[in-house]
Every structure is written in structure tokens, then in C-alpha cells.
């Protein structure tokens, strides 16, 4: 051991003792951080403690659970294991776990996707387990291709590491193809027939501009896919799940392992007392990795059987006479999986959702609009909205036709549940994102110790979610009649949907329904003919460059009809990428792309050295008496021709809008509203939504109309929260 390494270890040992014994805090990161500061190579040096090597576990969802289970399986097999079990997954967390370890057999390390490049080159792990990639914290990590490139880059620096990856995920298959490492794929080799949620993070082929086709899709982008234009397809599965049964509290399946070395296959049966299709993927990943690392099937089965997480991931806590299931969810795919768990339980139940927006969560929470909360609408569920962004959660639930009560914390939610006789003994679900989870868990654990196993007193008021829903509806009927439903044409929703953009369509739809105005949403898929002559409202969302470019191609083929539609006062809402396309040109990855030339404006790339504009934004717009709040994330800078009016002016320097000079955002032309505001735009800005609906109806009927009034308290409170926070 060199002097530097010795010094690093010494300092970190002192800091560990101080943290634990003086400040009574867990020492999961800090000692490693100091040690790395003193000796940046300390991880490489300390891997000498690992007799057999290590595995790095990366992926968006499931890392902590899987890392712990692999460590458990190896320990059950009699191996000595070093593991960062609490999810401290940066280099400092890995370094800390190694510092605290004695001589061992295996290192099992959970790694943050973007930090693998700072860990793997030092550990030179025998295996890298890649679970899945979903859009997560885009304001922190940028688009998903950045995460992919970073993982490929890490793998290149440890070319002997064997990549064990989810072959059902096209984003992981692309990494396996681009990295030089040997690889084995796992996947589910049959259709699970799950409810197909709309969100998919990878509609396009990873190699060309084809749109992926699926023999079946399980959820998100996971499934048996192939590209119709090139050879990109799900790989052969070395570990394939068959005979899958997912019950409300158990999972059973067989893993068929095709061992190419031995030219034979073996089958193992997996049983677990947990629920959720995502757990099937997790268990399959655990099996594949543990098996390759030499754990016998009996040890893996034992680890799975003993799996009782107490880290807030799928943890059950008994409070009074309620079973409270606590789980982490931090992106649409994770949330949707939790909703499936909630829906599987029949009868009356309570669910609380907590969403924070701290640095570690990502400041942008527009992804909650990609969560299919609407599924709860016909369930007998009493819902609560919590976390720093509780107003946004309540708003999102409202547009899923779910009435949710605001709560300060888990304790308050639980008290309401305990006091409500109609909820006596019912199952409770508490779903929290990253930084919200520890507090929720702590409060629940405290209540578990104190709450008595007694029923609520019968004189307490039951929470009536159905009655609350009636407040969404207008008291008055419309004073006009429509022969056909109002038709919203949503152009290429799969390609163009960033930061909750699709939520705009939901807002328009619900605000019509709540007023008794018949409405019909028509999704126009890529390559499908569309006749805008039938449309009353056309919607175009934003997209990552590659998807925006493909959508642009189809829009160019529709140019004449889009131009006619706009010039004859058709209503069009276009967000960010969709807005850029309306001008004569914009840039994708530095390359100039010809746009529709419908608006007199153009979009330049970010100037040399300038970064992407990623910020909250507030503007003053003639379409709303309240400030319009949103979220922007764009590289392009847009400049309006001199006669084109902006959508609004940036309020109090909060945000950027079109570019850094003009202090304006978006464009208003005839009945076109074009803007950089994601979020989605219309959720917290209902007056803009109503302007769009009103213009569409007036255009159809050829006369002025008044829209019946709606109660917009929830919308306005969510708007006011952001205005206050941003100082507007
Ligand atoms: N690709 C475009 C840009 O970065 C638009 C992105 C978006 O729609 N958010 O400028």
C-alpha cells in the first residue's frame, strides 16, 4: 500500500468513526469521498480485497433491490461479499463500502448510470449487469442517448467485463452492440398480456430511422421488438423466462438458461412472494447474474425467499389494522408499475403519492403527466397528494379524474386513514420518489410502533372521493350544441412527447368533458394519412432531435394541408420541437433541417460554447390574466420575423424563452399558439387551455360562444405555488 493510499484510508477511518459515533449519521458516502480526494485510485487499489472480482449493477429501475438480492444469494452460497447496500451509488459510495470491508470474495456494487465511467475503469469488474433504461431526471442527465453513450464509454474502459443485459430493452441492446465487451442477454420469452401503458422511451430503431415493431410489448419499451428496416432486433436470450404467473402477491416462472459453452440448457424455477411484472424482470436479472457468479439455484432461491426489504422498496409496514405498502417510484415506468400493483387489489383502498423536486429527484417533474393515473379513476380508492410538489400531483390526478386531498406528510395521510371508518383495515399504498421516500418511511416506522390495532370511531367523517369528483364538473350546461364531437388531432404522440407534452391533450379533453362538450381525440401515428379538414384542434409536442427529425419528414409531406388549416384559422398548439418545425429551418445535432415555413421565424443552434436552456419559466401572455408557468429544455434559439407576435414576454427574467436576447417566448399567429413551455403548458395555465377550446368551437360554429365555468382552484394553486417559488 502506497503512502497516499494509506493516508486516504486513515483519514476516512477517522471520518467514519466521527460520523457514526459523534454525529450518529450513517457513513455511506463521506469517508469514500475524502479517500477519493486524497487518492483518486483508491477504488482500484482496494479491489485487491476481492478474491473473485466484482459486478457493477446499472439501470434506471430496480438497482438497489437487485444489488441486495445478488449479494444475499452469494452470501447464502457461503461467499464473503462487499456491497453498497443502501444505494449510495456514486464512486464515493463504492469507495466507502470497500474501505469498510475486510478481505472478501465478491464486490457487488450498485452504480449510478452516469457514474459507471468513474467506477468501472477502476474496478475492472468481471460483470456489468445492465437492467433497463427509462427516461429519468432528464434535466440532470439530458436525453437518454447521453446515458447510453456514457455506459458504452465506461464499458470500453473495461473491455473484458462481461455485460449481462436486458435483451428486451432496445436501449440496452444498442449498448451491447456498441460496446466491445462480451455479452449475454436475459429477457421474458412470452407475452405477459399486461395493460399496455402508453409511455415508451424508445419508439425508434437504435440503428436507423425505422420505427420499432413488437411481437409483444410488456411495458415501457420492453418486449420482443425488431426494426422493419434493418437487422436491429431483440437478441437471442441466454436466460429466458417462461411459464410466467404474476399473482397479486406472488410471482412464479421458469428460467431457461441456454449455456452456449456446454451446448445444453438448464431450467430453474423461481418463486417469490412479491408482486409486479417489474419484479419478474428484477428476479430474472438476479438469477442470471448470481448464476454466472457461481451461486447454486438453492442459494438464489433462499435469498429470494428471505427477501423482506426494509429500505422502503416494496416494504410492508403494519400500522393499526392496515398493511401499508411503501415503494419507491421516480419515473413514469416505475409509477405505472406501482399503479398496476394498486389496481390488482380489489375493494376499497387508500393511496398516497409523494413527489419531491430536489436536485437528486430532478427539478422537473413534468413526467408525472406520463404516468397513467387515469387507471385509478374507476377504482374505489381514496387518494392523497404529498411531497414538495403536492399541488402538481393533485393537479395531475385531477386530470386523471381522481380527486386527491393534499397532505403535509405521510403521518397526516395515515391519521386521516386511521380516522376514517370506511377505510377500516383497508390496504394502503404509499408511493414516493427519491428524496421523498426516507421521510415517508421514517414516519410510517414511527407510527407502526405507536398506532393501536383499533378501528376508527364511527362518528368520524368518511372521505368521499366520488363526491369530490363532482366538483370537477361545470354547474351550467353549454349554451351551444355541437353536431359532432370536437376533434383533437394529436400528431405523432409517440415521437413528439417530451416533459409531459401529451398532458396538453388530456387537459383539453377533460376540460371539454367536464363541461358536457363532446370531444374526440384522434392520434395520428407516424406514416398514417391524416385529413386535417376534420380537425378542430391540432397538437404537436416536442421531441428529442432524432425523433423530431423523423416527425419533421412526415409533417413536410403534409405541408400544404397544415398551411391551409392554419391560414383558414384552424387552431394549432405546438410545443418546443413542434414549434421549431413551423419555421423554415431548425437544427438537429448541428445539422440544418428544412421546416414547414408556416411561421415567419427561424431557429438557430445554441451559439458556440453556450449550453442548452434548461429552466423553469414564467411569462406574461395576452391569453391569460395569470402568469403562465412552464418548464423549458431546448438547444435551439428561435428568432421571430418583425410582424410575428410572441406568445408572451418572460416575466421578471424567470427563464429564457425564444432566445437569450428578446425576452419573449413563442409565437401567436391567427389561431396558432407556439411556445417553448413544456410542463405540460395547459395544466397550470387553464386560461390558455380555454382560449384554445373556445377558438376551436367558435371556428366550428362560426359564432362567438361562452364556455361554462369550471372550478380551477387546483390549477390556480399549482400555478401560484410555482409563481411564489420562482418569485414571479
Ligand atoms: N430538439 C429541440 C431542441 O433542443 C427541441 C427539444 C424539445 O422539444 N424539448 O432545441
Image (cartoon, helix red, strand yellow):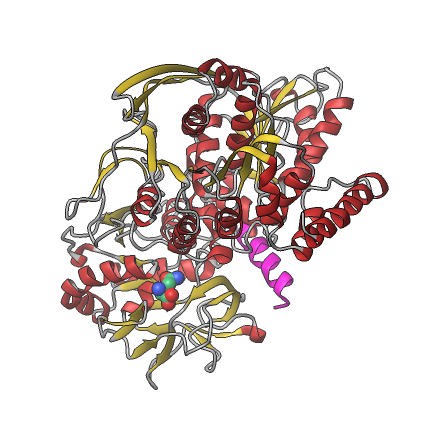
The spot of residue 202 in percent (x, y) is: 32, 47
Q: Nearer the viewer, residue 334 or 36?
A: 36
Tell me, yes or no, if residue 387 can be seen here: no
| Image height of 378 relative to 199, above or below | above
- Residue at horizontal 52%, vertical 55%? 364
Whether residue 147 is visible here, answered yes or no, is yes
Residue 601 rendering spot, x and y as whole percentages: 31, 78
Q: Position of residue 412 (x, y in %)?
A: 70, 35
Residue at 66 percent of width and 38 percent of height: 438
Residue at 49% across, 35% down:
62
Left-right relation of 128 to 489: right
- Above or below residue 640? Residue 507 is above
Is 726 in the magenta? Answer: yes
Residue 147 vertical position relative to residue 224 in the rendered view, above or below: below
Frontmost residue, 410 versus 107: 107
Q: Nearer the viewer, residue 182 or 304?
A: 182
Q: Quadrant of residue 333?
A: top left
Image height check: is 178 above or below 25?
below
**Residue 458: horizontal and vertical position, in percent?**
70, 18
Lateral position of residue 361 relative to residue 602, left or right? right
The extreme bottom residue here reads: 642
Assign ligand 1 to one image quadrant: bottom left
State which region is magenta. 714-728
In the displayed structure image, the side of residue 129 where residue 190 appears, left or right: left
Residue 268 in which image quadrant: top left
Let me know if residue 675 is in the magenta part.
no
Q: Main secondary structure of the magenta part?
A: helix
Task: Farthest residue to the right: give it.
Answer: 22
Amino acid at each position: 500500500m502506497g503512502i497516499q493510499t494509506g493516508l486516504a484510508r486513515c483519514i476516512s477511518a477517522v471520518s467514519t468513526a466521527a460520523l457514526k459515533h459523534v454525529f450518529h449519521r450513517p457513513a455511506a458516502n463521506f469517508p469514500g469521498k475524502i479517500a477519493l480526494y486524497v487518492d483518486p485510485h483508491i477504488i482500484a487499489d482496494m479491489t485487491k480485497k476481492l478474491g473473485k472480482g466484482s459486478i457493477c449493477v446499472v439501470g434506471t429501475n430496480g438497482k438497489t433491490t437487485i444489488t441486495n438480492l445478488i449479494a444475499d444469494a452469494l452470501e447464502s452460497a457461503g461467499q464473503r461479499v462487499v456491497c453498497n447496500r443502501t444505494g449510495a451509488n456514486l464512486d464515493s459510495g463504492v469507495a466507502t463500502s470497500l474501505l469498510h470491508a475486510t478481505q472478501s470474495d465478491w464486490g457487488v456494487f450498485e452504480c449510478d448510470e452516469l457514474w459507471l465511467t468513474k467506477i468501472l475503469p477502476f474496478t475492472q469488474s468481471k460483470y456489468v449487469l445492465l437492467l433497463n433504461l427509462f427516461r429519468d431526471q432528464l434535466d440532470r442527465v439530458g436525453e437518454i442517448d447521453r446515458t447510453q453513450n456514457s455506459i458504452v464509454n465506461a464499458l470500453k474502459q473495461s473491455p473484458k467485463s462481461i455485460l449481462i443485459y436486458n435483451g428486451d430493452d432496445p436501449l440496452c441492446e444498442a449498448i451491447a452492440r456498441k460496446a466491445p465487451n462480451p455479452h449475454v442477454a436475459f429477457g421474458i420469452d412470452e407475452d405477459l398480456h399486461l395493460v399496455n401503458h402508453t409511455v415508451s422511451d424508445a419508439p425508434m430503431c437504435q440503428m436507423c430511422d425505422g420505427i420499432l415493431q413488437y411481437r409483444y410489448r410488456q411495458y415501457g419499451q420492453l418486449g420482443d421488438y425488431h426494426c422493419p428496416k434493418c437487422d436491429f432486433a431483440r437478441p437471442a436470450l441466454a436466460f429466458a423466462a417462461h411459464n410466467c404467473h404474476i399473482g397479486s402477491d406472488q410471482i412464479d416462472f421458469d428460467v431457461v438458461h441456454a449455456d452456449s459453452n456446454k451446448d445444453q440448457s438448464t431450467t430453474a424455477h423461481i418463486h417469490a412472494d412479491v408482486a409486479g411484472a417489474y419484479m419478474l424482470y428484477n428476479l430474472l436479472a438476479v438469477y442470471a447474474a448470481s448464476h454466472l457468479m457461481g451461486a447454486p439455484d438453492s442459494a438464489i432461491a433462499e435469498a429470494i425467499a428471505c427477501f423482506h426489504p426494509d429500505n422502503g422498496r416494496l416494504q410492508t409496514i403494519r400500522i393499526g389494522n392496515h398493511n401499508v405498502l411503501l415503494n419507491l417510484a421516480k419515473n413514469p415506468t416505475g409509477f405505472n408499475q406501482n399503479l398496476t400493483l394498486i389496481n390488482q387489489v380489489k375493494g376499497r383502498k387508500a393511496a398516497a403519492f409523494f413527489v419531491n423536486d430536489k436536485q437528486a429527484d430532478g427539478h422537473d417533474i413534468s413526467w408525472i403527466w406520463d404516468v397513467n393515473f387515469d387507471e385509478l379513476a374507476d377504482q374505489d380508492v381514496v387518494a392523497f397528494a404529498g411531497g414538495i410538489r403536492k399541488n402538481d400531483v393533485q393537479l395531475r390526478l385531477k386530470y386523471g379524474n381522481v380527486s386527491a386531498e393534499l397532505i403535509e406528510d405521510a403521518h397526516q395521510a395515515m391519521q386521516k386513514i386511521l380516522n376514517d371508518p370506511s377505510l377500516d383495515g383497508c390496504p394502503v399504498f404509499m408511493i414516493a420518489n427519491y428524496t421523498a421516500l426516507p421521510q415517508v418511511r421514517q414516519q410510517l416506522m414511527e407510527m407502526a410502533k405507536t398506532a393501536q390495532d383499533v378501528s376508527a370511531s364511527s362518528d368520524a367523517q368518511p372521505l368521499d372521493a366520488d363526491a369530490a369528483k363532482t366538483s370537477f364538473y361545470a354547474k351550467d350546461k353549454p349554451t351551444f350544441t355541437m353536431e359532432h364531437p370536437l376533434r383533437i388531432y394529436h400528431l405523432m404522440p409517440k415521437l413528439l412527447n417530451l416533459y409531459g407534452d401529451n398532458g396538453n391533450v388530456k387537459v383539453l379533453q377533460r376540460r371539454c368533458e367536464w363541461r358536457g362538450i363532446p370531444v374526440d381525440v384522434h392520434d395520428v401515428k407516424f406514416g398514417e394519412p391524416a385529413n386535417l379538414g376534420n380537425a378542430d384542434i391540432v397538437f404537436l409536442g416536442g421531441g428529442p432531435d432524432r425523433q423530431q427529425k423523423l416527425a419533421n419528414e412526415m409533417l413536410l409531406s403534409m405541408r400544404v394541408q397544415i398551411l391551409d388549416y392554419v391560414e383558414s384559422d384552424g387552431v394549432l398548439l405546438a410545443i418546443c420541437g413542434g414549434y421549431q418545425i413551423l419555421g423554415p429551418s431548425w437544427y438537429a445535432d448541428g445539422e440544418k433541417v428544412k421546416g414547414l415555413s408556416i411561421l415567419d421565424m427561424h431557429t438557430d443552434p445554441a451559439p458556440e460554447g453556450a449550453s442548452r436552456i434548461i429552466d423553469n419559466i414564467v411569462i406574461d401572455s395576452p391569453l391569460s390574466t395569470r402568469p403562465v408557468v412552464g418548464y423549458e429544455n431546448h438547444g435551439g434559439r428561435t428568432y421571430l420575423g418583425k410582424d410575428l407576435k410572441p406568445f408572451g414576454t418572460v416575466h421578471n427574467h424567470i427563464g429564457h424563452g425564444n432566445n437569450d436576447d428578446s425576452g419573449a417566448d413563442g409565437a401567436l399567429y391567427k389561431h396558432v399558439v407556439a411556445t417553448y413551455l413544456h410542463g405540460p403548458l395547459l395544466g397550470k395555465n387553464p386560461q390558455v387551455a380555454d382560449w384554445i377550446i373556445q377558438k376551436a368551437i367558435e371556428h366550428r360554429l362560426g359564432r362567438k360562444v361562452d364556455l361554462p365555468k369550471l372550478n380551477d382552484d387546483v390549477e390556480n394553486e399549482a400555478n401560484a405555488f410555482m409563481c411564489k417559488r420562482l418569485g414571479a
